[in-house]
Amino acid sequence: MNNPRDFDWTTTAIWIMLTIFGLTAIYSATQGPVSEFLPSNIQSNFYKQLGFVVISILLMIGTQFISPRAFIQLSYLAYILGILLMILTLLIGSEINGAKSWFRIGPFGFQSSEFMKIATILAVANYLTSRRNISVENIRYAIISVIIILIPTALVIAQNDFGTAIIYIALIPVMLFWSGLPYGVSLFIISPAIILYLTVLNWQLGVLSALLLTGVIFFIQRRTWLTLTSFFTGILTVIGVRLALTEILQPHQVARIVAFTNPSYDPTGAGWNVIQAKTAIGSGGFSGKGFLEGTQIQLKFLPESYTDFIFCVIGEEFGFIGAGIVLTLFLIFFLRLLGIAGNHKHPFAQLVTVSVTAVYFIHFFINVGSATALLPVIGIPLPFISYGGSAFLANTIMLAIILNMDFHKREFSIYR
């Protein structure tokens, strides 16, 4: 029988502290006079989130009594049921903010794509760890794994939820790399995203990055076909971005892309959120304006402050100190999860832990990047802090699974 002292109470404590920060920020962001940006029904979101936190605590406790072997045995079934649920959501789901990703049962609604992340990670981890390491010569396992990830990705895109689709796509290089995909091939997979980002900033920078990445890939892998493919992919990415910005996309779409680097391009439209976000964080100073005292937040200059821009609430009302504490908690959180992965002897537990950590980090990176104008506003919540019951529950379940496998790692090791 496992000793309760073996449970990772430190990581759990960090989760609790992040959750408290989130509840505090959500309460602040949903108070104040009713307005265009704060409908009357939004003011109850704090209590809804509090309810989800209570449910999540019960799930966290209950998950620890499950045998870790169940996560392997039920992974494919969970994946199939998840796919069916996402298809059902497309057919009869509800549309909110342009995304048809909500499935309702009576008064209760949830985002099927959030829970599908869990099933996808478990299914791919089971598939990859039941086979030998991926290599350039035997890449069949990698292709099948990519297909497993791309099926829910396509359904998420069909739901018009491109932000969540990015999370699924980002799992591909992470899971394949950890399963043995060579460094050069892994870099090749992520290089288009790097080139795309830099091309939006400056097309010459995009070309330079394409050439540099091609050189690095050749130096690492020394394979002519991979080098040539990398070069042409990089150049086509630059050309594609330029054509999209100048010929294909509509002006309002271009404005949203350009606004994150130059908010004054459309200050009352696409650049509005970026300007208000930067103003909120900057005006917080060192110690902040105080709880419920943030002018940008309380006067509702910043839309979606309780979801996409929750970090701005913390920055304005608790200043550099509050924002720094949150960033530090996340850093410690990520390092502890990677430490858990490193301590596992079972490859399935390792891959699941690393993949979940990657999901958390990508959410964190995009959300904070959007709030600080380093990235375009995509609409990705900050784990455990942003408002959203489905996201909070799904993120907590993923953490509960990690803590379960860590708590039962002696038992888990016999299933290798």
Image (spheres, helix red, strand yellow):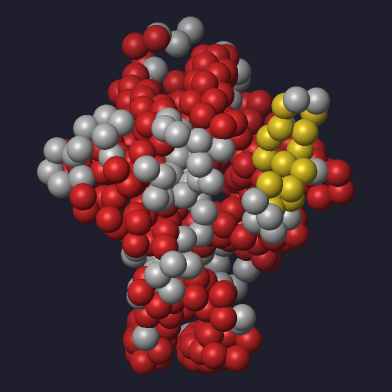
Q: In this view, does 307 lie above or below 261?
A: above
- Vertical position of residue 13 compared to residue 294: above or below: above
- What residue is rendered at 33% in x and 26% in y? 17
Rendered residue at 35%/74% (across/down): 264
- Picture residue at 45% right of the left edge, 40% below the top: 306
Residue 342 visible in the current orientation:
no
Left/right of residue 171 with respect to residue 206 in the rendered view: right
Quadrant assignment, res 221: bottom left
The answer to which image quadrant residue 20 occupies is top left
| x, y percent for residue 171 | 54, 55
Q: Residue 351, position in %: x, y? A: 51, 45
Q: Which quarter of the picture shows residue 229?
A: bottom right
User: Which residue is nearer to you in this view: 369 or 352?
Assistant: 369
* In-front residue for pair 1/255: 255
Q: Residue at x 39, y 50 (%)?
A: 301
Q: Position of residue 226 (x, y in %)?
A: 52, 84
**Residue 207 appears in the picture as rendered:** yes
Most foreground residue, 121 or 309: 309
Q: In this view, does 198 lie to the left or right of 91?
A: left
Q: Which residue is at the far left? A: 286
Judge by depth and name the residue closer to the eye, 368 or 346: 368
